[in-house]
Image: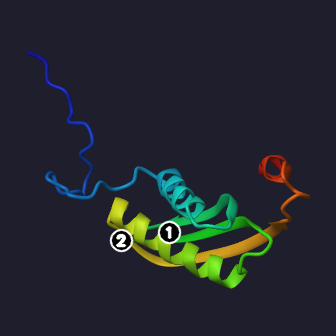
Amino acid sequence: MTTRPSTGAKPGNSPTGSVPRPDDEADVARIAAQAASLVPGVSVVRPAAVRLDDRSVGLDLHLITWYGHSVPTIAETVRAVVADRVTAQTGLNVAVVTVTVDDLLVPGVDSCGAAAREDG
């Protein structure tokens, strides 16, 4: 009979853990980007920084939005949605979500611009 180390168990995690802890900053960045991309008016999301410690996380996100949407409203909605989703999926307290809007896309002018901007 061979024994193997258990998978998924990490120090500090509850064995019955209702909320799995992220493996690293990349997991938190992925969760944050997916959540932010659901906000109406957001075209592109780039996680810029993830500051992770034992109990909390800080996030910096860069967005490209569509012209005609309220930038302050989008930024505040992204902050709330990302904080809720990251907390729900990781169990971490979200200390701060900093949102920077890098560009506005104009409908009819930038129809292909979002894909080109993701590379640069």
Q: Quick one: SS at disc 2?
A: loop
Give the amino acid type for the residue marked by disc 2 in the picture: Arg
Q: Is residue 7 above or below residue 51?
A: above
Direction right: furthest residue: 109
Q: Is residue 68 left or right of residue 35?
A: right
Crowd around label 1: few <14 · some 14–19 · many ≥20 (10 Å): many
Give the amino acid type for the residue marked by disc 1 in the picture: Val
Q: Nearer the viewer, mark 1 or mark 2?
A: 1
Q: Is residue 24 above or below residue 102?
A: above
Q: Is residue 68 left or right of residue 58?
A: right
Who is closer to the viewer here, 91 or 45?
45
The color scheme shown is rainbow
Crowd around label 2: few <14 · some 14–19 · many ≥20 (10 Å): few
Which quarter of the figure has residue 90?
Answer: bottom left
Circle 1 is placed at which residue position?
82
| Quadrant for the N terminus in the image | top left
Labelled disc at residue 59: none
Q: Quick one: SS at disc 1?
A: helix
Direction left: furthest residue: 1
Where residue 11 appears, as percent x and y from the top left, is 25, 54
Direction top: furthest residue: 1
Q: What residue is drawn where x is 56% and y is 77%?
A: 77
Who is closer to the viewer here, 54 or 41?
41
- Label 1 vs label 2: CA separation? 16 Å
Which quarter of the figure has residue 69?
Answer: bottom right
Q: Are marks 1 and 2 in contact (CB under 8 Å)?
A: no
Q: What residue is drawn where x is 32% and y is 66%?
A: 91
Q: What residue is drawn where x is 84% and y is 52%?
A: 111
Q: What residue is drawn where x is 82% and y is 68%?
A: 103
Where residue 85 appears, as percent x and y from the top left, is 42, 65
Circle 2 is placed at which residue position?
55
